Structure formats: C-alpha cells, structure tokens
Image (tube, grey):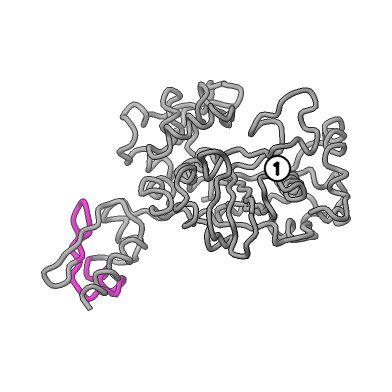
Amino acid sequence: MTYSQAQKAQAVRWKHSTGTLPAEATLPAPYVTKNGSSTGPEHDFCLPPAYATWSLLPEVRELALELFVELGVPWHAGVAGGPSNHLLSSQVQCVNALGQMVLDADRLHQAFGDLVGIEEVLPIEPGRYLTFEYIGPNDFFNEAPRGERIRGAHCTSVDAAFKHRAADGATELVLLEWKYTESYRRRAPAPESDAVRQSRYGPAVADPAGPIRGEVLPFDLLLDEPIYQLVRQQLLAHALEQTGAEGADRVRVLHVLPAENDAYQSSLHRVEHRALGSTVEQVWQQLLRRPERFMTVDSSLFLDPTITSREYVLRYADDLIYDQRSLLEAFGISDALGLEGALDFHGTVVLYDELVDLQIGTEGTGLEYPFRPVELQDLANELAEGDG
C-alpha cells in the first residue's frame, strides 16, 4: 500500500469515527476539481460539497475562513469560496496544523523553537504571529506585470510564514512549505511558458551570489516539479533576505513533508537529476549554495495534541488503535497479560470494549479508543513513575 493509499484509508476511518462531523457529512461524494466540476465517481475520502468547510477542524475553522477572506487567499480546488472537499488536501492539513498558531505564539514556539532556535516569536502581520500563503511585499520576479498579485495564486508563495528573534540575536523570517501526499510526474515540453520562466527566474538562478548553484544543471532541467517550486521559493527567500523584508536579517525555508511519502522523494524522472542523488532531498541539497537556509521537517512533529489538537491526531495519525482487536494486532499479543509484558507494566491491564484500563494497586486509569500506541505506553510509564 502506498503512502497516499494509507492516508486515504485513515481519512475514511476518521470520517466515520469522529464526533466533529454531522451524519450528512459522512456520506461519500465526488471530488470537486479546481474548475468546479463534481461529475466524477463518489469517494469515501471526500466530503459532500455542502460540508467542505467541515474538513477544517473545529478549533481552526472560523479563524481560517475569515482570514482567507481578509487576505484574499483562494483555496486550492475550493468549494464555494471555502476549502477543498478532499480529505487529503495538503492546504487543509497545513491550516489544521498551524491555524491556532496565528494567535498562539506558545504553540508556534513549541513546534519550531528547537528547530530554528526561537528566542521570541514576533508578529508577522498586525495581530498575527503566523500567516498563510505568504508572497512577500514586492514582486521580485515580475510575476504580475499587468496587475496585483494574489496570495497563493499565479505567483511564488509559501503555505505559511512566521517571524522570530533567534537565539543568536538575528531576526529571522521563516517560510513554510507544506506537503502531504504529493508526488510529481515528468512534465511535458512547454516552450512558450518556459521562455517566460527563463526571463523571470533565469538571471537569479545564474547569479553567482544567489542561493542556487546554477552551474549544476541547465535551467530547463530545473523546471520539473518539485524542483521548480523549490527553486522559486528559495529565490524568494534570498530576495526577501537581501532586501530586509519584514525587518529580517535572515530568511529560511522550512519544507514540511511526511517522512513516509516515498513517492514525493522519488519524483525524479530525468537521468540528470538521478545522477545527483536518489531522492528529491538529496538532489536539492546539491543545488543549494547555502544549505543552512533550507530545512526539511517531518510532519509527524504535529501529531502532538499540545502543538495541534487531539482531533488533529485522530484525523492524521496512521497508527491509531480503534478497538481491542487492533490493539492486540498493534502490540503483537493475544491477551491483556501479553499487553502487560509489551508495555513493561508492573500492574494489571483490563481490556474493555470502550477502553483499556491500567491499574496499579487500587489506582486505575482508563484510556478510551481511539488512541496511538505511544499514548498507551506513555500512560503506563506515567503510572509506574507515580507508583515509584
């Protein structure tokens, strides 16, 4: 089973087990494409179009809908001005993970503090610590020669951004790009479009002081996705840093991606790319002049309810235990006694239909389904420490 297939299966399990959806929203539905068509087959991993906004989790829904309207941000394959009805939308997952950080600096610090050395989270926009579909204050690459740029559409953007004062005293702008189940095919030739891309980005790629080692690959070999998007976002980061945008001394790109998404890393369809590395990440490192201005982050980081929410974990974790049968399978055991050994728990485990009860002496604590194996282990360790 591929990563994408596994995530579809998890999305279906969440859809039919969560208490956050009305019954009508759990029906299968066709995917609404970016041109608004919904004539395809029905899928259980899609919500009925009338309930597309329910793909946003309760704790972020109202804020995200209002913010996207205020910023003029279009939703990818959005339905009626709201988000996609596809439960594997990476934009929706990004908003579900980061939405609370718009107003909550503590969550942002907890998620990224150790990664980038946050000393103090700073507002990036009035009243906001994090924003979405960031494009910067200037059109560095003449991407909108005839009109105003739109955040998240037809110009170089990143899914989110925040600013902080780093431990070394520098003010750093962090650009976040979020991937979920994406993978990419080899592109077809497009001479007219490629000429426009050459005029916009070619000089910046060729600049010996720029962020891309333009001598490694000819420009046309940088136009295959996902390399092309990585190039443009790094060029944007460099231009922002050079101009001191947002008062930043340093600008870094953080690429959030599930470590299990092998299809993304294998999106290398030319021999010239594969000569530089066996994964997209390896190839990209060969193209960076300053690798410290880029960082890959495993999105499993956000499967922590203190960073996101309990419902986020239930929505996206792929190792959830839903009942006694899946509990026994997950730990490779046949009964409660076996679970005591698997957890190294010197107490009593009692299995119920709705929960697992861990008991030491006269004290017991139940953990209701669904939960992750690590949560059960953490509870067992916590009880053991308390007893000691």
Identify which amino acid the numbered label 1 is placed on.
Arg
**Residue at the extreme left:** 362
**Residue at 53% over, 53% down:** 121
Q: Is residue 251 left or right of residue 324?
A: right
Q: Is residue 76 left or right of residue 279?
A: left
Query: Where is the C terminus found, in terms of image quarters?
Result: bottom left
* x then y, percent, for residue 351: 20, 60
Viewer-proximal residue among 371 and 117: 117
Q: Is residue 298 left or right of residue 333?
A: right
On the question of residue 106 being in view, the answer is yes
State whether residue 295 is above or below residue 201. Answer: below
Q: Quadrant of residue 288?
A: bottom right
**Residue at 38% over, 53% down:** 305
**Residue at 37% over, 45% down:** 311
On the question of residue 269 being in view, the answer is no
* x then y, percent, for residue 256: 58, 51
Query: Can you identify the residue that label 1 sits on?
Result: 185
349 in the magenta segment:
yes
**Residue at 17% over, 71% down:** 360
* x then y, percent, for residue 35: 61, 22
* x then y, percent, for residue 334: 27, 65
311 in the magenta segment:
no
**Residue at the extreme bottom:** 388
Badge 1 crowding class, 10 Å Cα cut-off, few under 14, some 14 to 19, many 20 or more, is few
Query: What number of labels is visible?
Result: 1
SS class of the residue under badge 1? loop
- What span is in magenta? 336-358
Viewer-proximal residue among 151 and 324: 151
Viewer-proximal residue among 283 and 161: 161
Q: Quadrant of residue 286?
A: bottom right
